Image (cartoon, rainbow, N blue to C red):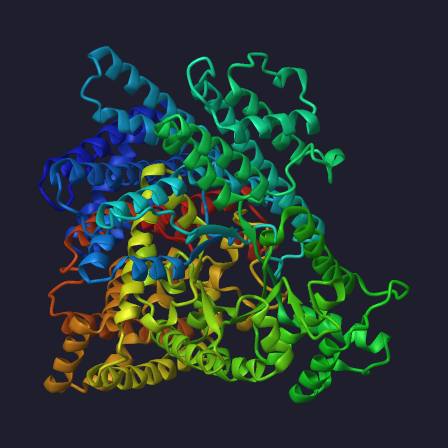
């Protein structure tokens, strides 16, 4: 299996990629022979060659022969064939990831003093060249904010054990570039990689059970331990280096503009396993991770701080702090340092002991432990000042400064945890509580304005609403316990451990006020007797559907007009966080309308907030797949309207995106460097932004019309075609995707077959697996054609929009990515599983017609002959991957057909299901997308 080795470009760098893929492919071939004999390798090669031939020239007779070859596989061999193709893609993905790191290094080696596009230095240089002085640059940096929020959304098909093997293989393959390796060392490296691939072959790709929430917490924390604790400070160091280079007359300590947050252990929307106890345990685990990282770093630092007072003169401040520590802290015997002439090592023993005691509840509220991370930072700064006092600046800059930055970024809580819950859960709890207190019989049935007036009155009333003597239902008790947990967590772990409470499916102002009333019950919100409002937990609306996006500006105006609400925002530094959902808006309205309505909502909500002097932090709920807003991190920042980024940006990092961006330090650094560059660039654009030009206003009017027509077309099929859901369920592996143990959360919010209750992730996942990629392109062609109308002047307008309107260009290019990954020849094979031929033919013909139309419109607008002609490297990569994914797709159709036949007879077949799930993993690896 060595043929996927031709890539665009002819440079030495691409030769190395071809070398790595060939090398790993040959090793896999050896493993296939070792594990399954020559027969297995021969069958795999025969299928691969046939698939390539079919892709090169599609002939009906070849197609039938290929399907017969697939269908005739004996089950034992079939299982191994599936795994062979799936593991091959895993190895190719590893080689391509490593190549990204290599390309950056190659560029830096050859560029010399040339500044690479998309780097931090390029953005800082632009800042200087645009004429921003030191004070203005400081203001821009002080206003920048990006928080990347890890979620446990079930889109990572790989087990942690598999990802660990991938990491080891990646590290070993990088060694192939080492020119100093001897022949024997290269042989040993090859032998080591052969054993790793054998281990990969003999490790089960499938989880035998769903992960628990705490399993997911551990998985998320892995990236902090392995990557982010090390890489994030390096990004800050590079930014400060560049600022010093271009503004050399000033000292720079960049504010903490880039942080990581998490939903894992806090996101209870539709996941009954996320309880208040789980949230508390999550916080405890996160604290343990950060404290142990600091202890590990201090242990390393001990080796470097051997300075002796026999030779250097340390500060009185350092000696006084040691004396205080001696009086307040009892050292364990293992921590004591007896050389009085080495004060830094003595000081480090006390730092280590006080960190140790942070994890010991018996030392709470005593000087034996750090009361906060700020106290730890103050000790580090004492060491830093003393080192500089005797000119040990290099040690201070290399070690202490980095540790201070780590403490500033990760605190004693590692990552800020968000809480999320569905709005209906709050309404149900409020209804029960108000009825028991005889305030209103049925709160849920009140008109919206009556709800608002009641909730506003309750917020202004200092009296409690709940009673410890009342019996509440289990759901209501859990609802209240969450707020109590947040209150205790802020006291124990610091206020920054949890600051946002997200409300899924926010449809009205009352949904937000309910959370505030619950916050008031436990002390997270209060209005003191002197009128002062204290608020330490913000209610964050999540607007998800198209209707909710339309309603959002009015909802926020209604809230900002309310004195008690506006005062709560003032208590949070006049900053309101608002989340926008990319997944459900796409599922609700299609890709074009979702993208357009999100842009409109961003602008209109910003305008509403400006009326009240409120800054906004928009939280973009992007998924990894194209149908859920997926795109590179830097592009997701640059695509935002400039006037909407002033209060900061939050973005979700989900599932397979987390492992692809943060498994390897080199790729993590590059991703975060590009994000920082994009932030600075976006901030410059916001400063220079004069509002939309008349031309752009005209383009936005055109987009509104395209969106309207696209929405109509999309909803005609998805919502108004009565048999659409039947077609979707039967012609995709939707049900089987739900049996893949990749997340603790159910695939539906309720035990319901309603489209509205289907989560966006399995919706996109199933369409991707079946090669339709329906959510990523459907109805776009109809919308574009509605403006074009076969009129060349209108086409010229669309082409101008593509060249000069970045939003429109992003939409069209995203359509290109989806169209080239989709394959309607294979999708037709999935459609054959639909039990009603009339339904199948009716719906499939609509999908095929729209696919052709969308492709033709994209080609006309972009002025190219074939999809992605203007991005040849990506075009070639996808084209070369497709023939290797195809066998897995045909195998999946065969297996699904067999499995469903068995199940229709009231039986089951665990081995068939296992093979189906293996094809799901393999296709996900091949397309590099799940949900």
Work out whether residue 3 or residue 529 is closer to the camera in this orientation and state it: 529
- As drawn, the residue found furthest toward the right would be 469
Q: Is residue 293 left or right of residue 929?
A: right
Work out whether residue 216 or residue 70 is closer to the camera in this orientation and state it: 216
* Quadrant of residue 95 within the rendered picture: top left
Residue 887 in view in this figure = no
Residue 327's x, y, as percent?
A: 69, 26
Residue 194's x, y, as percent?
A: 33, 22
* Quadrant of residue 402 within the rendered picture: top left
Residue appearing at x 19%, y 54% in the figure: 875
Residue 62's x, y, as percent?
A: 20, 51
- Above or below 543: residue 173: above
- Above or below 393: residue 601: below
Query: Across the whole image, how many numbered discs are drawn on residues?
Result: 0
> Could you tell me which quadrant the N terminus lies in?
top left
- As drawn, the residue found furthest toward the left would be 10
Q: Is residue 550 left or right of residue 560?
A: left
- Above or below 5: residue 300: above
Residue 278's x, y, as percent?
A: 67, 48
Q: Is residue 393 left or right of residue 242?
A: right
Work out whether residue 770 or residue 36 is closer to the camera in this orientation and state it: 770
Residue 715 in view in this figure = yes
- Above or below 875: residue 185: above
> Could you tell me which quadrant the C terminus lies in?
bottom left
Residue appearing at x 34%, y 66% in the figure: 776
């Amino acid at each position: 299996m060595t043929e996927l080795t031709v890539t665009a470009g002819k440079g030495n760098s691409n030769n190395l990629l071809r070398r790595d893929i060939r090398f790993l492919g040959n090793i896999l071939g050896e493993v296939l022979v070792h594990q399954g004999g020559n027969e297995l390798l021969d069958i795999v090669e025969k299928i691969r060659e046939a698939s390539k031939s079919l892709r090169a020239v599609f002939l009906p007779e070849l197609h039938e022969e290929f399907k017969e070859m697939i269908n005739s596989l004996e089950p034992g061999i079939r299982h191994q064939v599936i795994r062979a193709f799936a593991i091959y893609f895993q190895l190719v993905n590893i080689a391509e990831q490593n190549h990204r790191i290599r390309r950056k290094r190659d560029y830096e080696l050859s560029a010399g003093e040339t500044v690479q596009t998309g780097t931090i230095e390029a953005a800082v240089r632009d800042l200087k060249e645009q004429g921003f002085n030191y004070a203005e640059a400081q203001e821009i940096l002080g206003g920048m904010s990006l928080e990347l929020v890890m979620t446990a959304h079930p889109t990572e098909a790989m087990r942690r054990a598999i990802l660990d093997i991938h990491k080891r293989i990646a590290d070993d393959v990088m060694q192939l570039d080492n020119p100093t390796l001897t022949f024997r060392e290269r042989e040993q490296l090859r032998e080591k990689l052969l054993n790793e691939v054998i281990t990969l072959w003999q490790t089960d790709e499938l989880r035998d059970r769903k992960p628990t929430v705490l399993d997911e917490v551990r998985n998320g924390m892995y990236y902090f331990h392995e990557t982010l604790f090390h890489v994030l400070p390096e990004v800050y160091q590079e930014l400060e280096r560049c600022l010093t280079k271009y503004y050399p007359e000033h000292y720079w300590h960049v504010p903490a503009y880039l942080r990581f947050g998490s939903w894992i252990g806090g996101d209870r929307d539709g996941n009954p396993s996320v309880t208040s106890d789980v949230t508390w345990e999550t916080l405890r685990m996160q604290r343990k991770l950060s404290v142990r990282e600091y202890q590990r770093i201090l242990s390393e630092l001990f080796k470097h701080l051997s300075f002796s007072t026999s030779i250097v003169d340390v500060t009185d401040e350092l000696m006084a702090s040691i004396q205080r520590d001696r009086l307040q802290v009892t050292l364990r015997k293992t921590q004591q340092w007896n050389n009085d002439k080495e004060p830094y090592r003595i000081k480090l023993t006390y730092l280590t002991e006080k960190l140790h005691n942070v994890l010991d509840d018996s030392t709470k509220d005593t000087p034996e432990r750090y009361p906060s991370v700020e106290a730890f930072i103050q000790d580090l700064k004492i060491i830093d000042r003393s080192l500089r006092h005797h000119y040990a600046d290099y040690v201070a800059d290399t070690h202490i400064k980095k540790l201070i930055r780590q403490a500033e970024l990760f605190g004693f809580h590692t990552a800020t945890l968000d809480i999320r819950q569905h709005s209906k859960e709050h309404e149900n709890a409020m209804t029960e509580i108000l009825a028991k207190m005889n305030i209103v019989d049925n709160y849920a049935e009140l008109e919206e304005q009556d709800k608002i007036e009641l909730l506003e009155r309750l917020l202004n009333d200092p009296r409690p609403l709940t009673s410890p003597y009342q019996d509440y239902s289990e759901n209501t008790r859990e609802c209240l316990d969450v707020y109590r947990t947040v209150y205790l967590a802020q006291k124990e772990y610091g206020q920054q451990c949890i600051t946002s409470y997200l409300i899924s499916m926010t449809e009205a102002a009352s949904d937000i006020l309910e959370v505030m009333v619950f916050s008031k019950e436990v002390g997270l919100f209060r209005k003191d007797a002197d009128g002062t409002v204290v608020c330490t937990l913000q209610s964050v609306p999540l607007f998800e559907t198209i209707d909710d996006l339309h309603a959002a500006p009015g909802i926020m105006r209604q809230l900002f007009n309310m004195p008690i609400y506006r005062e709560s925002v003032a208590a949070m530094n006049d900053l309101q966080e608002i989340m926008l959902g990319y997944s459900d808006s796409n599922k609700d309205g299609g890709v074009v309308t979702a993208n357009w309505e999100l842009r409109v909502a961003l602008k209109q909500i910003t305008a509403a907030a400006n009326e009240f002097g409120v800054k906004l932090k928009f939280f973009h709920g992007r998924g990894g797949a194209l149908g859920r807003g997926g795109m590179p991190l830097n592009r997701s920042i640059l695509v935002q309207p400039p006037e909407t980024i002033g209060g900061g940006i939050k973005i979700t990092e989900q599932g397979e995106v987390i492992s692809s961006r943060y498994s390897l330090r080199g790729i993590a650094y590059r991703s975060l460097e590009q994000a920082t560059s994009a932030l600075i660039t976006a901030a410059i654009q916001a400063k220079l932004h004069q509002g939309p030009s008349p031309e752009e206003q005209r383009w936005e009017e055109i987009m509104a019309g395209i969106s309207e027509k696209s929405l109509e077309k999309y909803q005609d099929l998805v919502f108004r075609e009565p048999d659409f859901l039947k077609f979707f369920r039967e012609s995709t592996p939707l049900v089987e995707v739900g049996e893949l143990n990749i997340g603790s959360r159910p695939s539906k919010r309720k035990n319901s077959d309603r489209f509205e209750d289907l989560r966006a992730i399995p919706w996109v996942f199933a369409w991707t697996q079946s090669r339709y990629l329906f959510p990523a392109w459907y109805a776009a062609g109809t919308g574009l054609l509605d403006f074009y109308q076969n009129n060349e002047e209108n086409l010229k307008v669309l082409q101008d929009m593509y060249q000069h309107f970045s939003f429109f260009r992003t939409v069209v290019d995203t359509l290109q990515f989806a169209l080239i990954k989709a394959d309607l020849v294979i999708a037709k094979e999935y459609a054959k599983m639909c039990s009603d031929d009339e339904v199948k033919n009716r719906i499939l013909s609509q999908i095929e017609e729209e696919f052709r139309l969308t492709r033709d419109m994209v080609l006309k607008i972009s002025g190219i002959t074939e999809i992605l002609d203007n991005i040849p490297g990506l075009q070639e990569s996808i084209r070369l991957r497709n023939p290797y994914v195809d066998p897995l797709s045909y195998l999946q159709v065969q297996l699904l057909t067999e499995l469903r036949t068995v199940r229709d007879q009231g039986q089951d077949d665990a081995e068939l299901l296992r093979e189906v799930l293996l094809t799901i993993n393999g296709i996900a690896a091949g397309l590099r997308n799940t949900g």
